[in-house]
Amino acid sequence: KGLRKTVVKKTDALSLLGKPKKTKKSTGGRKLKSVNKALLKPKEERTLDQDALTSQFKVNAASSKEQLKDSPEKTRTRHGMLDAIFALTEVKGSSNTATGVMELSTLELITVFLLAYGLADTNADVRAKARNILRQIVAFFGSSDEGIAFLLPTMEHVLNNGVTPNNNVLESLLGSKRGKNSPPTTESVSTTVTAMNRRKEGAVVALGSVALHLKGEENYSKIDSTVDMLLLTLYSATDMDGNNNTNESVQSSVADCLVKLMKKGNTPKRLEKPILEDLLRSCLNGEFHSQRRGAAHGIAAALKGSGIASLKKHNVVAKLQDAASNTGNSNNKEGSLFAMELLSVRLGLLFEPYVIVLL
């Protein structure tokens, strides 16, 4: 009797119809308040990961290279620009052949521009054209004392350092303002090892043209050192990049310079020894194809510059004939054929009687 009865109310399912369901209290308001508090923290407490932010705007290395990749349109533009400069070297009439006149400031500008950009171009055809234009401009317009005083130290500086010493000349024309359509500044001059080596190769050729204007016995040593430098470029086993595939366009340009230097300074006395002796050795016994080919260019240039009589005087034909008949050494045969080919190109009909004997 003393126990109290507990009554459990039974809910009828039908009685719950139409009534709203009881929902639990949501915690969304609390979360929103915590977010607002975090956003309203004092500025000194906020932190920003700079590396994470900048990484979102970095351009992919592969895509940037594709943007900088050369195109046929860009190459044609550079070719057209060089053609315009080359028009300056087109001398009409025999009276102007050796007396070309150009203002020193113009000579400085074109020379430094070609050294900085043309000779270091990534396109081989553009480099070859720039190299030949520079050679001709120096040969035509570099005969004045002021021109030699500018050209000689400039070429020597490029050979020693691989960069041009006269960036202020470019700055005076190109200006220092940057803009979408503004010309490039000297900051765009490439200073990579490859670009510097290409400039050195072009400077060797240009230095040969400078040597054409050197007169007097006091300059004989400079002429001799220039000839030696040109010869080394021809029959060197490797190019300036360390590869055993020296560009033949470089060798042809060097040979063009050598033709005109064969009768200057002490070169006539040095023709047989050591010039022809070293060239024949490299041509017939060189280890690499480019070495033999370059020496053949040198043989043809040396004999062209010294005269057809040098063929018999220095017994060149007999040496080539012996090498061509050497069945035990393929390098001898190939080198002799290279020399015959390039002698035919340089000497033309004058070499035809000797070809019949050799073949």
Image (cartoon, rainbow, N blue to C red):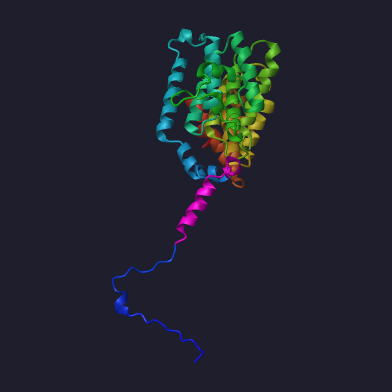
Q: Is residue 101 above or below residue 315?
A: above
Point out the stretch of residues depicted in magenta: 26-50
Expressed as whole percent of the image width and height from the top left, the position of residue 28 reads: 45, 58
- Compared across the picture, whether 221 is left or right of 33 comes to right
Q: Give the left or right position of residue 350, taking residue 227 as reference.
A: left
Residue 354 spot, x, y in % from top left:
53, 30
Does the magenta portion include 332? no
Residue 177 vs residue 17, the one in the foreground: 17
Give the image quarter of residue 212: top right
Q: Main structural element of the magenta stretch: helix, strand or loop?
A: helix
Indicate yes or no whether the magenta region holds residue 41. Answer: yes
User: Residue 52: in sight, yes or no?
Assistant: yes
Give the image quarter of residue 214: top right
Q: Residue at x 49, y 56 (%)?
A: 30
Residue 215: x and y in percent read 64, 11
Q: Which quadrant of the view contains residue 186? A: top right
Evaluate whether residue 352 shows in this view: no
Q: How many marks?
A: 0
Q: Nearer the viewer, residue 203 or 326?
A: 203
The relative height of residue 108 versus residue 243 in the rendered view (above or below) is: above
